[in-house]
């Protein structure tokens, strides 16, 4: 015979309401938590999530929306989000959506609301305020990652994109570089726009020319990184240094560098972004900007749990974390 919540409460020496509170994600005394978890394990008690959902109107599931499940950032942060949610008793419904479809995000938000999920974590592309309001009416809080949209009232977790681009550009300048190229994503997203500002401000402070020939802003893809590198290296006066400000852009640029037997850093100094694997596999080791992806995922889950549990009901928050530079041997010091 299957164990019941009454059996768990009796073995743990607590009330049924305390066990119920624990099972539904509420806070209980540490001593009680340990006793309840021990009783659940001993009795092999299985929570009836269907029955609980009907009673509490909570399904203990969270939707995660990523524009592309093939994207390095998306798949990396997804792993940490899923781990954190599972540790808190939540299952994850994962879905991607088209960045080019104006209704892509809205359709998937509706899909998840109809699945009666308790909250959503997403990278927001083409998200509208009305989407957030529709979710709020269904008591489904949403937390953004990677991109902050000041026009939309929603919690978000991002990095200081301005700061990391500024510091990487300064690193080139401090090593004597004056013609520094930048590869970024499409304009109009604060992730890209902030990185461009950081790059330009570093050049301005050093009284260096900002040349449109040395800025490539297209979609974030390997093809874009490859074409940018090809364009830069075929200029009458190529840059001496290049910053590729995204994982796929970095991979594409490195593909061109290898294909043309360009030597790093002798022929070109290079700094990539996000992908530590390629940085350490490449010879010489690449200098690379690294996002704290684990912390981003953990922070997003914490903020969502606070909203879902009613522990925070204030104005939308933006947590901005610092990226770091992992210094390799891909930047040459010019005399």
Image: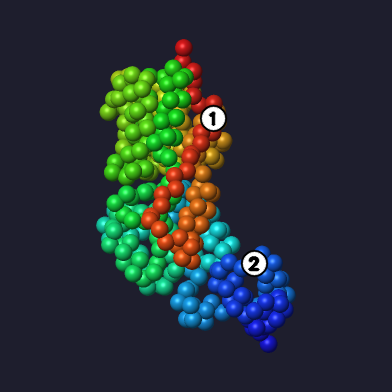
Which one is in front, 207 or 209?
Answer: 207
Q: Residue at x 71, y 77 (%)?
A: 13
Report the colour scheme.
Answer: rainbow
Q: Residue 29 shows which numbered tag?
A: 2
**Residue depicted at x 33% and y 53%:** 125
What distance separates the C-alpha of mark 2 from that of mark 1? 45 Å
Q: Is residue 199 left or right of residue 14?
A: left
Residue lying farthest to the top in this orientation: 335
Q: Residue at x 61, y 75 (%)?
A: 18
**In the image, residue 315 above or below residue 49:** above
Residue 278 visible in the shown view: no
Name the residue that disc number 1 marks: 327
Q: Residues within 10 Å of mark 1 (few under 14, many from 20)?
A: some
The x and y percentages for residue 45 are 65, 78
Quarter assignment of residue 138: bottom left
**If you read the primary sequence from the N terminus, does the residue marked by circle 2 or circle 1 appear first?**
2
Disc 2 crowd, CA 10 A, few/some/many (<14, 14-19, 20+): few
């Amino acid at each position: 015979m299957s164990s019941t919540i009454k059996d768990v409460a009796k073995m743990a020496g607590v009330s049924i309401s305390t066990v119920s509170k624990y099972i539904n994600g509420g806070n209980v005394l540490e001593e009680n938590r340990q006793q309840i978890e021990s009783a659940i394990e001993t009795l092999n008690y299985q929570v009836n999530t269907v029955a609980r959902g009907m009673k509490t109107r909570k399904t203990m599931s969270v939707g995660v929306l990523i524009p592309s499940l093939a994207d390095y950032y998306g798949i990396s942060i997804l792993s940490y989000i899923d781990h954190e949610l599972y540790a808190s008793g939540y299952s994850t419904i994962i879905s991607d959506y088209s960045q080019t479809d104006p209704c892509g995000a809205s359709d998937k938000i509706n899909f998840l609301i109809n699945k009666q999920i308790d909250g959503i974590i997403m990278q927001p592309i083409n998200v509208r305020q009305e989407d957030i309001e529709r979710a709020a009416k269904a008591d489904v809080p949403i937390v953004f990652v990677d991109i902050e949209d000041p026009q939309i009232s929603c919690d978000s977790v991002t990095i200081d994109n301005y700061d990391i681009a500024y510091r990487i550009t300064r690193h080139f300048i401090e090593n004597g570089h004056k013609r520094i190229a930048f590869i970024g994503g499409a304009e109009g997203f604060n992730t890209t726009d902030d990185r461009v500002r950081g790059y330009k401000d570093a050049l301005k402070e050093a009284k260096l020319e900002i040349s449109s020939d040395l800025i490539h802003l297209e979609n974030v893809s390997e093809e874009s990184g490859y074409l940018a590198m090809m364009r830069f290296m075929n200029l009458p006066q190529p840059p001496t240094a290049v910053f590729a400000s995204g994982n796929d852009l970095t991979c594409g640029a490195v593909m061109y560098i290898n294909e043309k037997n360009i030597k790093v850093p002798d022929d070109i100094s290079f700094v990539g972004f996000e992908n530590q694997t390629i940085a350490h596999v490449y010879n010489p080791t690449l200098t690379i900007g690294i996002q704290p992806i684990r912390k981003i995922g953990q922070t997003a889950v914490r903020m969502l749990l606070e909203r879902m549990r009613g522990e925070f009901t204030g104005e939308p928050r933006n947590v901005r974390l610092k990226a770091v530079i992992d210094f390799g041997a891909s930047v040459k010091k010019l005399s």
